Amino acid sequence: MPGTSTISWIKNLPQLAAPVLTAVSASTTQIDLSWVDVSNESSYKIEWSASGVGGWTQIGGTIAAGSTSYSHTGASAATLYFYRITAVGDNINFIDSGFGYANERTRGTALSIVQSVTGSTTTTGSIGIALTGVVAGNFLIYLVGQTDNSVVTPPPPSITSSPSITWKKLCGSPGGTLTGNTDIWGAFFAAGGSITCTAAWGSTAIAGVVSEISGVEAVLLGAQAYGIAQTNPSVDIETTRYGSIVFGVTSDYNTNDGATRTLRDTATELFYFRSISFFTGYFYYKQCTVLARKTLGLSAPTMTGAGAGTSMYEVRTA
């Protein structure tokens, strides 16, 4: 009839709750995804992206309702992946949820130390450490520890090398104290070959270790921590990437020195050099097989009087 119309009524369906997604690297080629099961879903849909802002690709097909995990296999090593998950509704009683997001990097090949060379002086504040056969592009890390009781001014040592490369301070105590000063520096040796690395730190006696490492990330973003005036020379450091290596240096009174001085994490923390003057310089490292907060450094004996100093830096895989 004239003046009549047809009205279509649309049911306003409730939306499913968005799953909370977690991603954990399981290997160099696998990332494990998990979530808390929501109610009333008919299935789940998981997608991944290289950027997190587009290019989403579905994986796993239709994932059954009630599922709480999925493993993304066949991934590339040392690669960051972005994920999103949707709880799928039946469009009769519920519509699809919003997205739950997570991202994770697959594990890279564990770093290995190609070579480590040590040096020390009890008379001047300068030591030169020579390395040969360095692979072009490899990373060099220089750990320096004070081994006498001089007040170091200015606080940081200077690091130079022949041939010249650009050194960056990665971690260190502020210096200017009698509590054991330590520093950690790093540089990439693009040309490779032979190089002499020199640390100069006022007139204080110092000891040092230079290590060559391959496969290091181009932009250095590893965790770092230091302590001064310590009664127990160790620090807490939280590792951030599988396969990385945490390097540490401690400067401590030699009256507390001992060839059997133990490390905090004796199972995996490796002691490889010590040098004695008025203080003792200790140098050690730990391979990171899990991501965790660890207390690393030296254990007993407990210091008395002025304390020790400790610096640590995590060298990460690319």
Image: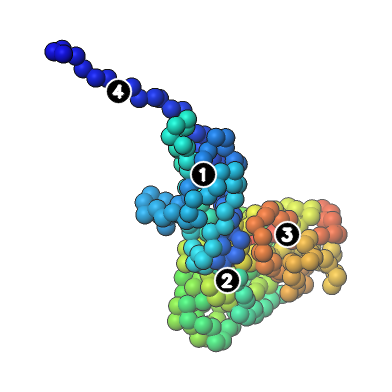
Tell me the residue that label 3 is attached to.
Answer: 296
The residue at the far front in this view is 1
The residue at the far left in this view is 2
Tell me the residue that label 4 is attached to.
Answer: 8
Q: Residue 143 appears in which quarter of the rendering?
A: bottom right
Q: Nearer the viewer, mark 1 or mark 3?
A: 1
Tell me the residue that label 2 is attached to.
Answer: 109
Locate residue 279, reporting x and y percent. 76, 66
Which of the two residues, 281 or 106, is positioned nearer the viewer here? 106
Q: Residue at x 72, y 63 (%)?
A: 250
Q: Residue at x 48, y 47 (%)?
A: 45
Q: Nearer the viewer, mark 3 or mark 2?
A: 2
Q: Amino acid at mark 3?
A: Leu
User: How far apart are labels 2 and 1 at the CA level?
Assistant: 36 Å
Q: Amino acid at mark 1?
A: Ser
**Is residue 17 shown above or below 82?**
above
**Is residue 137 shown above or below 22?**
below
Sequence-wise, which precedes: disc 3 or disc 2? 2
Sequence-wise, which precedes: disc 4 or disc 1? 4
Element type at mark 3? strand
Sequence-wise, which precedes: disc 4 or disc 2? 4
User: How far apart are labels 4 and 1 at the CA level?
Assistant: 29 Å
Which of the two residues, 170 or 23, is positioned nearer the viewer here? 23
Tell me the residue that label 1 is attached to.
Answer: 43
Q: Nearer the viewer, mark 4 or mark 1?
A: 4
Left/right of residue 281 with respect to residue 16 in the rendered view? right
Sequence-wise, which precedes: disc 2 or disc 1? 1
Sequence-wise, which precedes: disc 1 or disc 3? 1
Sequence-wise, which precedes: disc 3 or disc 4? 4
User: How far apart are labels 4 and 2 at the CA level?
Assistant: 60 Å
Q: Are marks 4 and 1 in contact (CB under 8 Å)?
A: no
